[in-house]
Amino acid sequence: MSTLLEVKNLKKHFPINNGGLLKKQNGAVKAVDGISFQVKQGETLGLVGESGCGKSTAGRAILKLLEPTEGEIRFKGEDITGYRGEKLRKLRRDMQLIFQDPYASLNPRKTIEQIITEPMKIFNLPKQQRKKKLDRLLDVVGLSSYHKQRYPHEFSGGQRQRIGIARSLALDPDLVICDEPVSALDVSIQAQVINLMEDLQQEFNLTYIFIAHDLSVVHHISDRVAVMYLGQIVEIGEVEELYSHPKHPYTQALLSAIPEADPELSRERILIKGDLPSPSDPPLGCKFHTRCPYAEEICRTSNPLLKQVSSGGQQAACHFVKEVALEH
Amino acid sequence: MPALPQTTNPPELPGPKNNASAKSSSLWLDALSRLVKSKTSFIGLCIILLLIVIAIMAPIVATHSPTDQQLLNRYLAPSAEHWLGTDELGRDIFSRIVYGTRISIQIGVIAVGISAVIGILLGGIAGYFGRWIDQVIMRIIDIMMAFPSILLAIALVAVLGPSLTNAMIAVGIVGVPQFARIVRSTVLSVKETEYIEAARAIGAKNNRILFQHVLPNCLAPIIVQATLSVGTAILDAAGLSFLGMGAQPPSPEWGAMLSDGRAALQTAPWVVAFPGLAIFFVVLGFNLFGDGLRDALDPRLKQ
């Protein structure tokens, strides 16, 4: 499998201006602070982390919906970081986004037909072809052709999400970034949409970056998982390996919080104390040290880098990977 | 009790067939039903419809020619022959008011059309592109708003020359800031929505996003503002005509009629009173309708 997407040291900082006339910059919110990873053709990379850790920002920066502050994005071997204007527009055919909120992501003034065919119109597909494609897309996402003339508000959340999925597939993209595509849906509908997404991946040979905070959903759909904390990746690896042998204390804490449907099972919950520190003023050293049960002096001064922790390619960013893993 | 004939009401068939025939109800239909339910806006709507009917049927409704002078019949009080009396040249006031409806509607629609087109463009561009374009446009709008509107209109007519067309242009330009500000603020909120981000993600260009995605979603406040502006435009144009800078004699414009009749205010008050009442009702009609429209289109009031 070839590498489809490669992200190197990607940063997205949002400047904080004090409201004055001169717009003096007062520091920055470091939403994404140097993440690197690769995504192979046809795989699903899960991106997990708590709210505000920068996962959505990372997704949008990769799609260049947000201008990255620093770093490099290579797509199909090409450096797309500096793409602008027409070149960037052409790139949109190959990279698409599925939104979190199916209620906000569809234009309420357009019919389903208009919504799904718009990308094809923008890229000048002939009318006949648009029609055929529309019918096929409606079919694969499980909507009927009489839905075409309706408006988004006439649909349920699950149906709307499927409309959004059909729109993002209209241009036959290679990479689809799914920004919490099921977190706004009921649990029963979540399964439907997830299964649909898996079928579509098979059928259209899609590569997914699946952003979510629901660890069980990520476990189900992902091939590899990256765990983010305060704008950085703290652990990344194959899904089974990472879920069974988490090496970073943050990953361990996250995984121990997944509820299990077995009342007999007694487990040790790893509780992390306190709140997520502000991304505008992140702690020095290891960003997790303020909440880490194992933190020592070195964690307060030096930020650990991702390093190989297993033969399977799992990487974690912790000074005490070995000790922590043993203790677990 | 005699047995009633059985009314056969077959139970509705479930299934996709029923679903398919279900009509697509748009947001506008919802709004319309709410609009008709409100009493005040219904009254406003009636006034506006009445006005339009009168304007279209003016030759049938009017009892006399609006410009026909009968100098022997000057300042006649209302009577069976002249329902609302006659003015200083013996013209029938009722007929003049009826024909004046045409002028007023024309003024309202054209002036508001000018305001809306310019205002929507300026406000849309300012709100959507932001940065220095926004600053430049909105500071110009601020300057326009700093002038009293009638003074600005007078200045414009002074430059263009007094005529009804120029009065409409002047009133139209004076109304631009209202539209620009409302459109800008709506655009600012709409452009942050996810469906605009979605449009960008599928490769839409700025023009397409602004005109096909952002502005159509700003329509509700624009329509409300347009309706409310018609009243103000008619009022402003009447003011200009009153000052002799709008409609020229012998055109039966209501503001000009007020001006012509003010010399005889003491002896023949009907010459002034009836055109004044006409202006009052029309402006009231548009304001009531506009307010109702605002309530109907506000999704927060949806139950």
Image: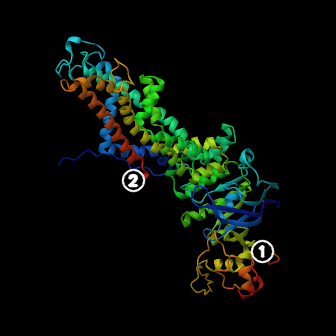
- Label placed on residue A305: 1
Answer with left or right where residue B47 lies relative to residue A101. left
Disc 2: which residue: B301
Compared to residue A265, the image places residue B267 above or below, namely above
**Discs 1/2, front:** 1
**Image quadrant assignment for residue B290:** top left
Categorize mark 2 by other alpha carbons within 10 Å: few (<14), some (14-19), many (20+).
few
Question: Marks 1 and 2, Cα distance to the nearest angstrom?
Answer: 54 Å
Q: In the rendered image, is residue A150 in sight?
A: no
Give the residue type at disc 1. Leu
Q: Position of residue B29 (x, y in %)?
A: 42, 43
Same chain for mark 1 and mark 2? The answer is no
The chain letter for the residue carrying disc 1 is: A
Query: Dot 1: what SS?
Result: loop
Question: Coloured how?
Answer: rainbow
The quadrant of the image that shows the C terminus of chain B is bottom left
Q: Nearer the viewer, residue B276 or B156?
A: B156
Categorize mark 1 by other alpha carbons within 10 Å: few (<14), some (14-19), many (20+).
some
Residue visible at 52% across and 39% down?
Answer: B120
Q: Position of residue A170 (x, y in %)?
A: 67, 48
Answer with left or right where residue B288 lies relative to residue A322. left
Q: Nearer the viewer, residue B294 or B180?
A: B180
